[in-house]
């Protein structure tokens, strides 16, 4: 597979530790990877982790530095071919399904012109809520590819559907979308 430019968004869920493995696999496959993190994501995995894995700074704010004078949401959207959000929390999915843009990740998801893949992750009770399923269906209708969560042991000490798909499963979806 030839080198491609991929954008990875990390929203605030415990599954973000799995995203580090996904990013590492993408870089090892020779891809250029830029990472965007929400403030909530920073509570689970630090910027230094993704910066070390990608060899690039991690973006967290729309107007966070002079390297993106038009805004990171414009520069990053123009540079990447594919945008993968993993984990995609219920909060992020609600914003994306309803066109809300109040942070870099949600703004970028509106500005991004290419293929978008999301890998939802949340508590099983949240996953089953009608509002979450409505938002998920809206995202599918909007052309967003969903890598469905798996059933298994969750950090909330419950077993059910809501665990983010394995990094290898998400990687396969990315490779398929790029080919």
Image (cartoon, rainbow, N blue to C red):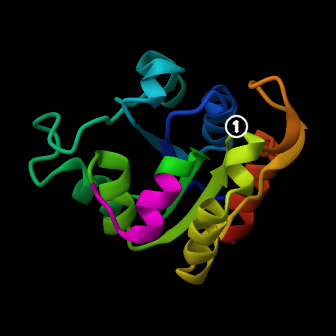
Query: Is residue 93 on the magenta stretch?
Result: yes
Image location of residue 56, percent across then percent down: 39, 31
Residue found 16% across the figure and 46% down from its top? 68
Residue found 21% across the figure and 45% down from its top? 62
Q: Main secondary structure of the magenta part?
A: helix
Left or right, 60 with respect to 47, comes to: left
Taking depth in this image into account, of 60 and 31 the one nearest to the observer is 60
Left or right, 68 with respect to 11, comes to: left
Q: Is residue 163 visible?
A: no
Residue 78 versus residue 152 in the image, above or below: below
Residue 106 versus residue 163 in the image, above or below: below
Image location of residue 64, percent across then percent down: 17, 35
Image quadrant in which the C terminus is located: bottom right
Residue beneath disc 1: 25
Query: Is residue 84 on the magenta stretch?
Result: no
Q: Quadrant of residue 67?
A: top left
Region in magenta: 92-101
Left or right, 179 with respect to 149, comes to: left
Image location of residue 171, percent across then percent down: 73, 50
For mark 1, does the 10 Å Cα neighbourhood hold few (<14), some (14 to 19), or many (20 or more) residues?
some
Residue found 36% across the figure and 54% down from its top? 106
Left or right, 95 with respect to 142, comes to: left
Residue found 30% across the figure and 47% down from its top? 104
Image location of residue 95, percent across then percent down: 41, 59
Taking depth in this image into account, of 84 and 30 the one nearest to the observer is 84
Q: Quadrant of residue 96?
A: bottom left
């Amino acid at each position: 597979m030839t080198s491609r430019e991929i954008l990875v968004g990390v929203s605030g869920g415990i599954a973000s530790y799995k995203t580090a493995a996904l990013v590492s696999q993408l870089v090892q496959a020779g891809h250029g990877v830029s990472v965007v993190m929400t403030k909530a994501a920073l509570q689970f995995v630090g910027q230094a982790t993704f910066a070390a894995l990608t060899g690039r700074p991690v973006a967290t704010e729309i107007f966070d530095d002079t390297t993106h004078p038009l805004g990171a949401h414009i520069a990053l959207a123009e540079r990447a071919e594919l945008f993968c959000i993993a984990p995609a929390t219920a909060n992020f999915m609600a914003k994306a399904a309803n066109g809300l843009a109040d942070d870099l990740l949600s703004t970028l998801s509106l500005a991004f012109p290419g293929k978008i893949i999301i890998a939802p992750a949340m508590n099983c009770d949240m996953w089953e809520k009608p509002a979450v399923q409505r938002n998920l269906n809206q995202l599918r209708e909007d052309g967003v590819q969903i890598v469905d969560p798996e059933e298994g042991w969750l950090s909330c000490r419950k077993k059910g559907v809501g665990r983010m798909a394995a990094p290898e499963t998400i990687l396969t979806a990315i490779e398929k979308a790029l080919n």
